[in-house]
Image: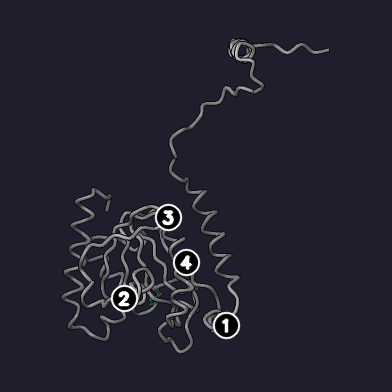
Amino acid sequence: MTKKILNQNDIINTEILNSYDLDGIFSNNPINRLKSEPTVEDKTLKLKKLKEKIQSIDDCKLKENGSKIVFADGNIESPIMIVGEGPGQKEDEQGKPFVGDAGILLNKMLNAINIKRKDIYITNVVNFRPPNNRKPEPIEITRYSSFLREHIAVIDPKILILMGSTAMESLFGSKIKISKERGNWKEIIINNKTYLVMITFHPAYLLRQADQKKYSWLDLKKIRAKIDEIGLNF
Ligand code: URA
């Protein structure tokens, strides 16, 4: 018979157990009472599961039309998350958001406030290309908004930038107008956490309406000021 060698903790624990007349096992492992930050591995796994969940959506005209899922691009640890509308032709071909003309303008807009595209995280309201690049229908926006909320909770950004009315409607509903709401800091609560939100014009809209770029520039400057105010490393 092998004899178990007791260490000091075992002896103390046994004595405590006996003195309290408890049935239990003590562990020498420290108890982590503080909720720790998710690791990159945790986030990667959650994103993989979310992508699979979206991939398996049933009875969806968008999924039937798109050639593949366009999930997201960028740094999953970024404190800045951008949400667009939905993939176009180039995005559908490459499986990445914002790689067409609107993406080129987006990269320039980010560069103008000293942000590199690779340092932020980008996704869309809907993850499959709508037929003929139409705007997603209200029912589609509502259906995909639960995925988007989950996506935001996993990325957990410090600043959330909603580009265009579809992204705005997805989180704030359709009763408000982007022309009124853009450029003002807002808050949204997702999973009991409050996120700072800036609504601004979509780069595809700016390509069609160049005279609106002056407003977009005001919004970008506010975003830059907030990055500096909260001390983000950009
Ligand atoms: N427009 C969007 O909203 N998203 C893209 O990924 C591309 C164009």
CA–CA distance between discs 2 and 4?
18 Å
Residue type, label 3: Asn
Reading the image, the residue beneath label 3 is 191
Q: Nearer the viewer, residue 12 or 18?
A: 18
Question: What's the CA distance linking mark 1 and mark 2?
Answer: 24 Å
Of mark 3 and mark 4, the one earlier in the sequence is 4
Q: Earlier in the sequence, mark 2 or mark 4?
A: 4
Which residue in the protein does label 2 denote? 164
Mark 4 is on which residue type?
Ser
Tag 1 and tag 4, C-beta contact below 8 Å:
no
Image colouring: one colour
Residue 132 image offset from top left, x and y in percent? 45, 89
- Cα gap from disc 1 to disc 3, whole angstroms: 30 Å
Q: Position of residue 95 (x, y in %)?
A: 50, 73
- Labels 3 and 4 touching (C-beta < 8 A): no
| Disc 2 C-beta below 8 A from ligand 1 | yes
Note whether ligand 1 is within 8 Å of mark 4.
Answer: no
Q: Which residue is mark 4?
A: 146
